[in-house]
Image (tube, rainbow, N blue to C red):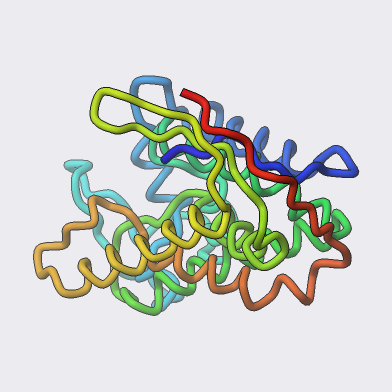
Amino acid sequence: MFPLKDNIPTDRFPVLTVALIVVNVLMYFLFQEGTLFGGPDDEIVVDYGAIPYEVTHLDQGCELSRGGRELACGEGADGPPTVLTLLTSMFMHGGILHLAGNMLFLWIFGNNVEDSMGRGRYIGFYLLGGLAAIAGQVAVAPDAVVPTIGASGAVAAVLGGYVLLYPRARVLTLIFIVFFFTIIELPALLILGFWFVQQIAFGAYDLTNPTGGGGGVAYFAHIGGFAFGLLAIKLFAQRHKDYSPPPKYPVY
């Protein structure tokens, strides 16, 4: 399922949502030196990604080994302060599809969440959601030496807030069925609820799979961000509209 558009209009242009998208795109192409068909520079990812081991061992750091394939952690490793990586990691991505997916969800659901609160509150909500996401990943893997990067956690906080603000919203969704596809309106609660259940299921599988089958996806970061959004949205949101027009017919 690929969401395309929701049916909740905004009263104000989502300046910060657009700004966050621009910052993420610039970070990928300029700072990370990423390309359309290749990933970002590995050394930049290691230096500025949030590594759980560094978070739980503040007196130590991690860096690429001479072969450039493994991380070596210990005292004396060069790199930016761990506190800085907690911020920079939220704006970094592992590839163009990773970036595009996160920005699509941020554009569709972030504009309405921004509309529900002042811009200062929105950026605070977004950044705190990203920090909660990193905390969730660190909690389940405190000694992991894999960099956690991506806006997914902060975006997950936006999704959690959106679910509570607009439980009756509907989302125009592209659905692929083998070689066929259809575009249909579905309840946002169904789409985002299904997404969250997926994160829990895949995260639980990762914990029980000794070989690690997650493919590098930080599921517990998603869970932590979404949970933050659910718990904190009422503290940040100042207004929201109860807008629920009748659903449209499916488009084929």
Q: Is residue 102 left or right of residue 244?
A: left
70 or 234: nearer the viewer: 234
Percent coordinates x, y for residue 145 in the rendering? 29, 63
Q: Position of residue 221 (x, y in %)?
A: 44, 64
Q: What residue is at 84 percent from the left and 57 percent from the top?
A: 241
Relative to 17, 139 lies left or right: left
State which quadrant residue 15 falls in: top right
Q: Quadrant of the image for the N terminus?
A: top left
Residue nearest the viewer, comparing 41 with 149? 149
Could you tell me how many numbered marks the image carries?
0
- Give the x, y percent position of residue 9: 80, 42
* Most foreground residue, 52 or 67: 52
Residue found at x 54% / y 66%:
225
From what the image shows, is residue 179 above or below residue 52? above
Say if residue 90 shows up in the picture. yes
Q: Quadrant of residue 111?
A: top right
Residue at coordinates 54% horizontally, 73% vertically from top-left? 227
> Is residue 61 in view from this perspective?
no
Is residue 236 rendered to the left or right of residue 203? right
Q: Quadrant of residue 71?
A: bottom left
Is 159 rendered above or below residue 37? Answer: below
Which sits in the foreground, 171 or 115?
A: 171
Name above or below for residue 225 compared with residue 71: below
For residue 238, side relative to residue 48 (left or right) = right
Q: Residue at x 46, y 28 (%)?
A: 33
Residue 31 image offset from top left, x and y in percent: 54, 34
